[in-house]
Amino acid sequence: MRKTEKIFEVKDFPYPHVIVKDFLDESTLDLVIDALAGLEYDFKESDLFSYWASIELTDIDHPAINILRDDLGDEVWRKKVAKAFGSKSLSSIDMAAYVYGLGDFLLPHDDQVEERIIAYSLHLTPEITEEMGGSLQIFDVDNNNSKLIDSIIPEYNSLIMFEVSKHSWHQVGEILQDIQRLTVTGWYHG
């Protein structure tokens, strides 16, 4: 179950984004992490990314995944997300799990696909530090010039959300130590 029901102030620069800390309660966290550990992951690699991805979790029928999907995507939470971002009504979510290991990365991109309105990433790696790599790096892009604005450490049980737009350039920094950066990531659709 969700531990928090509040979305604090959304930062506007360089594009709307927010971090919700302590998103899930401890018992739900344990169930979700156990369920994710039991999934199969396929290695995905190109010049733009390197990571391990689960199958799409949106339609899986598993007790812990069902709870997580409800916590992230039930009508009450979707309304709170839409209100916090001042967006149109959010009708659905999709989600998958990703594991980034030593040397893995995701280069800058803006997430503009289909009906994506808000991107989210729930971070499930305990005790991750900046030195380990894997930060969510957000950029200000103007006239084909980009500048790194913030490097957000993916703290355990934090939910990072941002508005998807032509300005929402971000990347996952390279993993620099022998860790596994586990996230459940997806999008709220309009």
Image (spheres, rainbow, N blue to C red):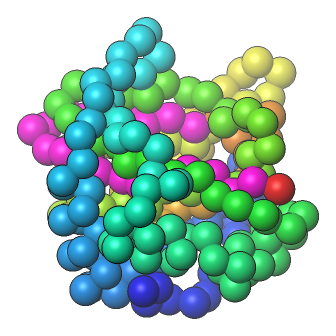
In this picture, is 129 found above or below 68? Answer: above
- Magenta stretch contains residue 154: no
On the rendered structure, is 141 left or right of 67? right
Residue at x 40%, y 40% (from the top left corner): 55
The residues colored magenta run 170-189
**Residue 167 showing in the rendered view:** no
* On-image quarter of the N terminus: bottom left
Name, please, the residue furthest toward the right.
Answer: 88
Residue at x 17%, y 31% (from the top left corner): 102
On the rendered structure, is 149 left or right of 158? right
On the rendered structure, is 154 left or right of 188? left
Magenta segment's dominant SS is strand
Coordinates of residue 54 in the picture (x, y in percent): 35, 41
In this picture, is 145 found above or below 170? Answer: above
Camera-nearest residue between 136 and 117: 117
* On-image quarter of the C terminus: bottom right
On the rendered structure, is 17 left or right of 158? right
Q: Which quarter of the figure has residue 126?
A: bottom left
Name, please, the residue furthest toward the left.
Answer: 178
Name, please, the residue furthest toward the top.
Answer: 47
Camera-nearest residue between 65 and 131: 65
Coordinates of residue 4 in the picture (x, y in percent): 50, 89
**Residue 16 showing in the rendered view:** yes
- Magenta stretch contains residue 186: yes
Q: Which quarter of the figure has residue 174?
A: top left
In this picture, is 96 found above or below 42? Answer: below
In this picture, is 26 found above or below 140? Answer: below
Residue at x 75%, y 54% (from the top left corner): 189
